[in-house]
Amino acid sequence: MMQGSLCALVVLSLVCLVRAGPPDWISAEILEMVQSDKGRCMAEHGTTEALIDDVNKGNLPNDKAITCYMYCLFEAFSLVDEEANIEVEMLVGFLPEHMQAVANELIDVCAKLDGADVCDKMYVMAKCVMEKRPDLWFML
């Protein structure tokens, strides 16, 4: 069963629109944990902090520099498989308990969408989450 990638609601790349930093539920521990993979994924895909900031303002371009970055980061933490299908238990396990039901609802809707490749799939999933729950969007 396809459980596609859900760019929102992940500790690494998701949840919260236009904030001056990550949402409260993303701990300093998690931020530290993702730093090396974030740097590697940014370098591999030509992603800039300015592009990430723009995405956090609600502007998600269909640009491989950001969509492949999202896949890279999800893959680094085993949140997706090689076809960008979401690893539901892993993803939901990163989230605080009070967010897990919402995450499962979004996964049920957005993870069924498909794309031309893993990067496009991430874009389609992210757009879905941004449209359904823009309040739950943040990208690291």
Image: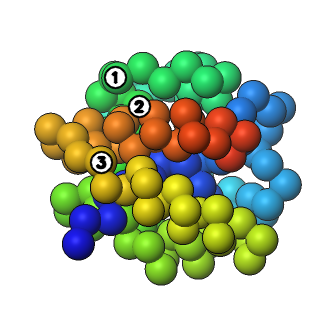
**Three-letter code, disc 1:** Asp
Residue type marked 3 = Leu
Asked if residue 96 lies left or right of residue 115, the reply is: right
Location of residue 56 in the rendering, given as x and y in whole percent from the top left corner: 64, 30
Q: Which numbered tag is attached to residue 63? A: 1
Q: Quadrant of the N terminus?
A: bottom left
Q: CA distance from mark 3 to mark 1?
A: 18 Å
Way the structure is coloured? rainbow
User: Is there any visible trace of residue 85 in the rendered image?
Assistant: yes
Extreme residue toward the left, this view: 116
The label on residue 32 is none
Name the element at disc 3. Answer: loop
Tally of numbered discs:
3
Mark seen at residue 113: 3
* Element carrying mark 1: loop
| 54 lies left or right of 66 | right
Of label 3 and label 1, which has the lower sequence position? 1
Which residue: 80% across, 33% down?
Answer: 19
Local SS, label 2:
helix
Mark 2 residue crowding within 10 angstroms, few (<14) / some (14–19) / many (20+): many
Label 2: which residue? 66
Q: Residue at x 59, y 78 (%)?
A: 93
